[in-house]
Amino acid sequence: MKFFVDTADVDAIRELNELGMVDGVTTNPSLILKSGRDITEVTREICEMVDGPVSAEVVAEKADDMIREGKLLAEIAENIAIKVPLTWDGLKACRALSDDGHMVNVTLCFSAAQAILAAKAGATFISPFIGRLDDIHLDGMDLIEDIRTIYDNYGYETQILAASIRSVNHIIESGRIGADVITAPPAVIKAMAGHPLTDKGLAQFNADWAKTGQKIGK
């Protein structure tokens, strides 16, 4: 399973990237706003740091405008994945941009029906939003499982990019079901290292070591 980092914070990306934890990055207008930086400037810096796909999102609502914006975003770097919304116009833009050889990430997917359309429109990635489905008392993992089954049934090559990840359990369940990629905030990825039994065991080891009165090295 590939790990994409869902942020425009270059320092957070750098820390994870140096550990080999970054296969790509996803951004959106909200994350760009949070970074406080120019979209072209920060996206270019991320693309230079990360070898994998970096999703940059269009903001237009009409297909022709999405295509125009997408092509401008693609000029930033070769590893740009153009992010378009799962609307009818977004699907039109996906078809046109993918036909031109661009990677396209179709975002804001909330149903298997939408995911089928995105695959047929040539999407490189489909981004089902787990957390936002959980927010309305649906199980977001059910959607990941449905899409995986349908894509495998028909050999669709679109990669399932599990998004709106809120917890470590979301990541684990996405991996169990077979999502190709997860995208999560840095804090959630780092939380994967934590476990209360690890903390308890370490505390015990340190306490026992202190009783020996020894040191490692001078």
Image: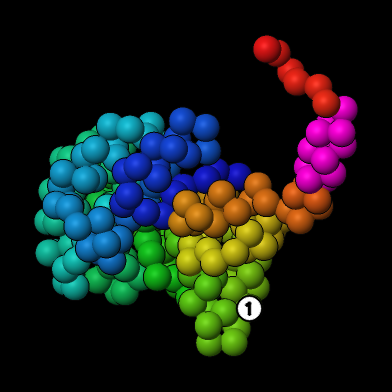
At 21% from the left and 39% from the top, the residue drawn is 44
User: Residue placed at 48% from the left, 62% from the top?
Assistant: 163
| In the image: residue 71, left or right of residue 104 | left
Please identify the quadrant where the C terminus is shown. Answer: top right
Q: Which colour scheme is used?
A: rainbow
- Magenta range is 201-212
> Which one is nearer the viewer's eye here, 10 or 214?
214
Residue ID for mark 1: 139
Q: Residue 92 is drawn in which quadrant?
A: bottom left
What percent of the width, then of the height, locates residue 111?
A: 51, 76
Q: Quadrant of the N terminus?
A: top right
Q: Give percent across and percent down for residue 28.
A: 30, 61
- Left or right relative to 202: residue 175: left
Query: Residue 99 location, x and y as percent?
Result: 28, 48
Side (left or right) of 41 relative to 192: left
User: Of 137 and 188, which appears nearest the observer?
Assistant: 188
**Callout 1, which amino acid?**
Asp
User: Can you tell which quarter of the image residue 48 is in?
Assistant: top left
Q: Is residue 86 magenta?
A: no
Is residue 94 in sight in this rendering? no
Residue at x 16% of width, y 44% of height:
41
